Image (tube, rainbow, N blue to C red):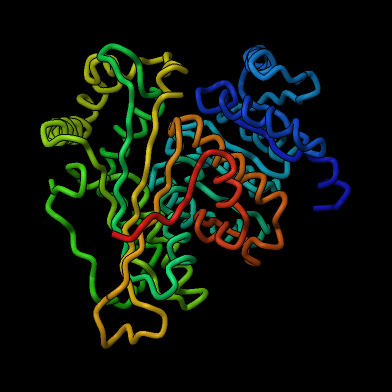
Amino acid sequence: MSSVHSMSRLSIVIFGATGFTGKHAVAELARLSKADSGLTWGVAGRARSKLQNVLDEAAETTGIDLSSVKIIVADVSDEKSLQEMCAQTRVLVNCCGPYRHYGEPVVRAAIDAKAHYVDVSGEPQFIETMQLEYGAQARDAGVYVVSACGFDSIPNDLGVIFLQQNFGGTLNSVESYMSCHVPFNIGSSAVNYGTWESVVYGLAQYGDRFDLRKKMYPERLPTFKPKLKHRFIIHARKDGWCLPFPGADSSVVYRTQRQLYESQHTRPAQIKTYVKFPSLLTTLGVALCATFLYLMSKTSLTRQLLLSYSHIFTLGAVVKDQGPSEEVTNKTTFKFELYGEGWEAGDDVNATLPNKKVKVQVSGVNPGYGATVVALLWAALTILRETDNMPKQAGVLTTGVAFRNTSLIQRLCENNLKFEIVNNE
């Protein structure tokens, strides 16, 4: 890639800018670019007129003149258009999901055009397949491909890194508890349809990830003791009742810890992820719904019913072509409580039991669009601005591996996604 070529590229292009996440990313990037005149950017998607509408809306809500923002027409089913789009940017921000359907050609085009790539996928099958299929190509091209740069899985993945950096000893294990407060009324849309689609397909292919993991890592990690045990499916913790959290987070954290163990010879932290609810009744209700959803996702006919009649199955929480209202999303808060256990510095980790506890909390507002697009865009900006602090070897990386030596956590704290050490239990 010639330096002239890279000079003439835009800093960032948002692909899928007309979707729910994309629209929020456009408004957020408009605000960020106001503070940095050197930041050039564009929006990309299938329809020029829709992209223009998104820019007009963002200009109206932010009061920023966006007339110079470049519009690029690109379609996920047209490889040439993806190549041309990626050749015009240094970092491609991909908001076009579900990624298992639309992600791969975009990753391929980015690597071919030597553009770095970030997305907000929470789909372990897609993320791990990209590492398996494109890891070597991305490394050879000197391109960073970093998935899961949103609510999945920055709070947990960088949360564990933050815990390791502030533990003051050796971290052995982490139990993470996620809780959300959503001002939800039955019948009002609270979740974007694309997210629902990802969940349904994710459950349908839940078993595939174990085969993928074997292909990615033919050699097993040594067993580190003491081993972190699973808690009961429903268990109480402090001020709530908890269930296992089946998202991408534990798979992403595992890959981070494994990669750091292999490259830096650091002891990998184990993690178990849970979701916490205020009452036992709610927890039982959620467990029942999750079991029903899992069974329904298993055949193509019942899966199609879930997707076609999402408004019925979710009591109006998911309505196709109608995302959650700004009022609901802006009042939705979340927190991750990460309970770390390990040893004081200097202790013999092989001869003594863990004797030190530190708790980290990661909290914010509007997980779907606020915190997610802030994390996504700061991940993109960090690749642009802090190349020297990124890993020397590029490739398909997790957020924990890519950003552990950068100022990303600090930037997120300054932008309402707070990482803090809270009192030990």
Apparent side of residue 258 relative to residue 377 in the rendered image (left or right): left
- Which of these two is toward me, 9 or 361? 361
- Which of these two is toward me, 216 or 315? 315
Q: How many marks?
A: 0
Give percent across and percent down for residue 321. Answer: 43, 14
Give percent across and percent down for residue 139. Answer: 62, 61
Task: Give the residue drawn at x 63%, y 25%.
Answer: 27
Picture quadrant of residue 126: top left
Picture quadrant of residue 343: bottom left
Apparent side of residue 190 relative to residue 6 in the rendered image (left or right): left
Picture quadrant of residue 367: top left
Q: Is residue 298 visible?
A: no
- Which of these two is toward me, 415 or 369? 415
Q: Outermost residue, front direction?
A: 423
Task: Give the residue drawn at x 56%, y 25%.
Answer: 24
Q: Is residue 362 visible?
A: yes
Give percent across and percent down for residue 373. Answer: 54, 34
Q: Quadrant of the C terminus?
A: bottom left
Q: Is residue 222 above or below residue 153?
A: below
Q: Is residue 357 above or below residue 301?
A: below
Task: Give the residue drawn at x 30%, y 20%.
Answer: 184
Apparent side of residue 63 relative to residue 280 in the rendered image (left or right): right
Give percent across and percent down for residue 392. Answer: 65, 67
Task: Give the residue drawn at x 71%, y 62%.
Answer: 388
